[in-house]
Amino acid sequence: MILVWLSINNSGGMISEKLKGGIYIALGASSYGMVPTFVKMAYREGFSTAEVTVSQYVFGILGLLLLNMFRKKTATTTIVAKSKTVFMLMLAGTSLGLTSAFLYLAVQYVSVGVGIVLLMQAVWMGVIVEMVIHKRLPGSRKLFAVVIILGGTVLATAVGQENTRVNGAGIGWGLLAAISYTATMFSSNRIGLQFPPLNRSLFMISGGLIITLLIFHAHLNQDFSLSIFLRWGIFLSLFGTILPPIFLTLGMPRTGVGLGAIIASLEIPVSVLMAFVLIDEPVSNSQWTGVILIMLAVVILNIGESVVKYLHRLFMS
């Protein structure tokens, strides 16, 4: 993945900026998508949620500190960090830490595929938050997308299917992860935008580490296995806290938020495929249908009005 990054940066004018941005976002989303499977593999080796979460954020902080130290400082990127803004970024980062903790707790009880589908309920939760903030009802396109997401979720989580037991704890933790993820998306897109991406990531991951240590402080005793740091901590921090923010901040300005969000939905099938290949988690046809429906809803939410009008004329003519 890092070799791909280097080849893109050295490609000069051969790749268009929008295509380059799309590749960056795809790499970032794919990185995020790998993490739940790594967590599940760590569980199978006997590690706990506290161990995987704390190791991810500790190594994430160290990695971002190193990247910030070696980052090229220019007149345009050197910005004096105001303590209030830093505090707000760290506060926003607590929701990021909660997202990781809740998602990792969820995949103790449900499959990786179900866990990531529950996390993506943040899409329709974001629509509700927008409705509350702007004090107006969402348009028909957003409502249609929400209905598709809910239908896709029923299929992807196998709710109501014969011989399927729904794990309430897993569903609950997954929905809490979605709520936290919704808070992360809204806060991270509004706070400290004047800071360089690596600075913002460092402050937010610091907040994530603090909340993680507070949640799991009772587990930081003699039973805490330090071997998690070398066994899984590097993988979890690299793919969960270091690479994704870098790739996404490199890609979003090139593609725009709408196209970027569509490409970022690759996180869902990557998670399902990783779990299928590496830990043999079964995926039924109905679950794949649910995953595709959720990705379709993301596309509907983010395509421009002009595209919607064009498709309407195309199918109604």
Image (tube, helix red, strand yellow):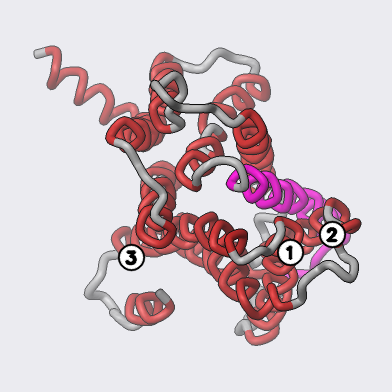
> Quadrant of the image for the N terminus?
bottom left
Q: Position of residue 258 (x, y in %)?
A: 41, 42
Q: Nearer the viewer, mark 2 or mark 3?
A: 2
Report the residue at 66% width, 37% height from top. Answer: 173
Report the residue at 35% width, 59% height from top. Answer: 277
Mark 2 vs mark 1: which is more N-terminal? 1
Mark 3 vs mark 1: which is more N-terminal? 3
Of helix, strand and loop, which one carries label 3?
Answer: helix
Of helix, strand and loop, which one carries label 1?
Answer: helix
Kindly give the residue lying farthest to the front in the view shown: 163
| Residue pointed to by mark 2 | 213
Q: Is residue 312 depicted above or below 118 in this figure?
A: above
Task: Give left or right: position of 161 versus 206.
Answer: left
| Residue pointed to by mark 1 | 51
Kindly give the residue lying farthest to the bottom in the view shown: 70
Q: Position of residue 299 (x, y in %)?
A: 35, 35
Is residue 299 visible to us here?
no
Identify which amino acid the numbered label 3 is placed on: Lys
Query: Based on the displayed image, in which of its 4 quarters is residue 309 positioned?
Result: top left
Boundaries of the magenta span: 79-107
What numbered label is drawn on residue 20?
3
Between 174 and 253, the one lying in front of the other is 174
Identify which amino acid the numbered label 1 is placed on: Glu
Q: Residues within 10 Å of mark 2 (few under 14, many from 20)?
A: some
Decide: marks 2, 3 in contact (CB < 8 A)?
Answer: no
Q: Residues within 10 Å of mark 3 (few under 14, many from 20)?
A: many
Q: Position of residue 271 (x, y in %)?
A: 43, 52
Between 101 and 180, the one lying in front of the other is 101
Identify which amino acid the numbered label 2 is placed on: Leu
